[in-house]
Image: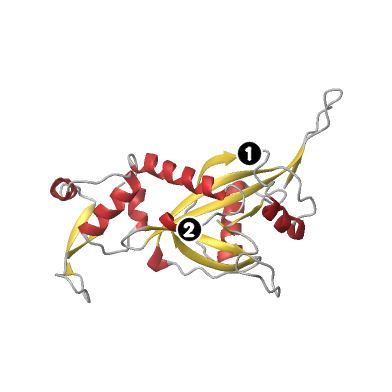
Amino acid sequence: MILRETHQPVTGVESAAFDVSIDNVVFGFDGHQLQVLLIRQGLPGEDMESDRFHMAVPGDLVLPQEELDEAATRILSTLTSLEGIYLKQFRAFGDPGRVADEKDQDWLRRMRPYPDRRVVTIGYYSLVAMENYRPKPSSFASRAEWCPLQDLPRLAFDHNQIVDAALLKIREDAAHHQLVYELLPEKFTLGQLQRLYEIILNRTLDKRNFRKNVKKMPCIVPLDEKQEGVLHKPAQLFTFRRSD
């Protein structure tokens, strides 16, 4: 999407032109650690070396006349085949040099008519239960896969910064909303729930106090079921009941 000033520019100052993009940070939880959904930039039919271009969060330009939320949904579906995922807008990123790295420019020269043009991106985040979603690459994504948050490689553009900012926003939102439970499977253990909270809040929680507090929460419902197929003593399972 190209935005151009329509008013008369100030004398001596050229009218600005820049692109607007969407970058989607999708978090999943595998029961032990947070994962981030990444794509590898690639072109159909081209033999791409493993490190030719960076991994990236799913993102692309907003189309003319397209709403931002609509663009976020379309881009995620186009690049990873994932649909029906809740996406929340959390911040804009507009550093003039965010697409200036030579490796990124090499990619942009293949993909964009104006690779040097400034790009302002709108960040969205989403939390999903990994067992419910199987990403499949499409369009210019040659791969789509989950990567542990703690093992993220150097990503394209400023995507490492965008992931960090998304995590900080989730940490902030988790104190006021029940969004943490979007990361859990339908049935989970209290150990998994505590581990998830510790990752989100970035601190260790006392096991006894945590379980005492959780059992007071009406939205956490104990089930008459235990884990199956585990080597350790099976733990009781719980489920989340959304409150109004």
Residue 173 % position (x, y) = 38, 41
Give the camera-side residue of 20 and 230.
230
Q: Is residue 132 above or below residue 168?
A: below
* Residue designated by label 1: 94
For residue 180, say whether it is visible: yes
Q: How dense is the environment of label 2, judged by Cα within 10 Å: few (below 14), some, or many (20 and up)?
A: some
In the image, what residue type sits under mark 1?
A: Gly
Amino acid beneath label 2: Ile
Give the quarter of the image for residue 103: bottom right
Pointers 2 and 1 in contact (CB under 8 A)? no
Q: Nearer the viewer, residue 138 or 94?
A: 94
Image position, residue 1 (x, y; %): 72, 48
Left/right placement of residue 71 relative to residue 146 reads right
Quadrant position of residue 223: bottom left
Q: Position of residue 234 (x, y in %)?
A: 16, 69
Closer to the eye: label 2 or 1: 1
User: Helix or strand or loop: what does disc 2 sit on?
Assistant: loop
- First in sequence, mark 2 or 1: give its number: 2
The residue positioned farthest toward the right in the image shown: 11
Q: Quadrant of residue 221?
A: bottom left
Q: Is residue 207 left or right of residue 181?
A: left
Q: Which residue is mark 2?
A: 85
Residue visible at 29% across and 49% down in the picture: 197
